Amino acid sequence: MSEEKIPLAAVIGCPVAHSKSPKLQRHWLNTYGISGHYVPMHVETVDLAEVIRSLPKMGFVGANVTIPHKEAVMTIADQVTDRASLIGAANTLIFRKDGTILADNTDGYGFITNLHQSAPDWVPKSGAAVVLGAGGACRAVVASLLEAGVPEVMLSNRTRSRADQLRKEFGARIRVVEWVQAGNVIEEATLLVNTTSLGMVGKPRLRVPLDGLRPETVVTDLIYAPLKTELLKYADEIGCTTVDGLGMLLHQAVPGFERWFGRRPEVDGDTRAAVLK
């Protein structure tokens, strides 16, 4: 890569100060000796389109997008990938040399790659998955599970209508389960996924009954604050393979970094340590 023009990338959100992405990207830039920069940008919704369209002129090669802008950037981009369209949100922007903007979603990739790396014995076709929640992160999770070959996704959300909407969009392999019945179907699953914020620092506890969990069930929580949620602690105690949410954050960043800076980074122990430091 030419030293004449230092590549720049950003994470855009509102708020954005809490983001771990700058720490992660800085670690990779340093590790691979790349003379680029990655910065957090607090951008209000009213300014989003103007800011994004001006970034390529300032030397930016791309950006990550976080809450609340993941849906809005899809209308700003010139092109949207099929997976971003399916999920209904984008978290990664690529600014091409011809001036056009491509919007992609790597959350599903990050989720499924983290799952395979941390639970290598999990076989998608081996059985159903129970997924708790029906928000933006859930859409990426469901899309990636169906693509991986999971035969059925039992979806449960506190507001049933949101789960019904996902079934309408993703099809017959989705079975909607009433929130009060979620605990009753866990024993049918080989995978349990929490995509809600329940159990996160400062949020209420996840109160779904877990006595249906079996030691052979893989349990993953998208939350990474705390790294070991009450759900994962309980699953550990009964012998389940557990997967924390930090890996998804790390793996979803890989495709963007590669497109922006020309090097595919590795997610390893040093990467986790750098982000947790």
Image: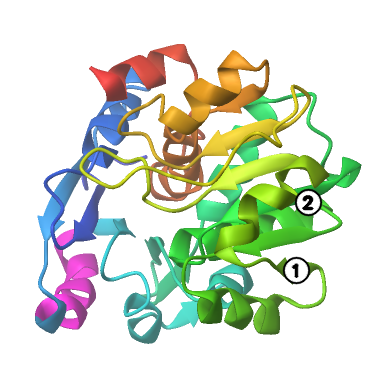
Using the rendered view, name the quadrant where residue 200 is placed. top left
Q: Does residue 111 appear to the left or right of 211 in the view shown?
A: left
Between circles 1 and 2, the one closer to the viewer is 1
Which residue occupies 50% across, 53% down? 107
Q: Amino acid at mark 1?
A: Arg
Residue 55 lies in the magenta stretch:
yes
- In this orientation, does residue 114 appear? yes
Above or below 190: residue 117: above
Considering the numbered disc 2 on the image, is that residue within a helix, a strand or a loop? helix
Above or below 56: residue 124: above
What kind of secondary structure does the magenta stretch mostly adopt? helix
Return the x and y of residue 42 as percentages of the image width and height. 10, 60
> Magenta segment range?
47-59
Q: Does residue 192 appear to the left or right of 90 in the view shown?
A: right
Q: Which residue is mark 2?
A: 148
Which residue occupies 26% across, 47% down? 203
Q: Does residue 121 appear to the left or right of 162 in the view shown?
A: right
Which residue occupies 82% across, 76% down? 172
Q: Which residue is mark 1?
A: 175
Using the rendered view, name the quadrant where residue 19 is placed. top left
Q: Residues within 10 Å of mark 1 (few under 14, many from 20)?
A: some
Q: Quadrant of the C terminus?
A: top left
Above or below 25: residue 270: above
Q: Name the one closer to the observer, 30 or 144.
A: 144
Q: Quadrant of the N terminus?
A: top left
Residue 233 lies in the magenta stretch:
no
Which residue occupies 30% across, 57% down? 63
- Work out how far the residue at label 1 is from the one at label 2, CA to CA, in angstroms: 17 Å
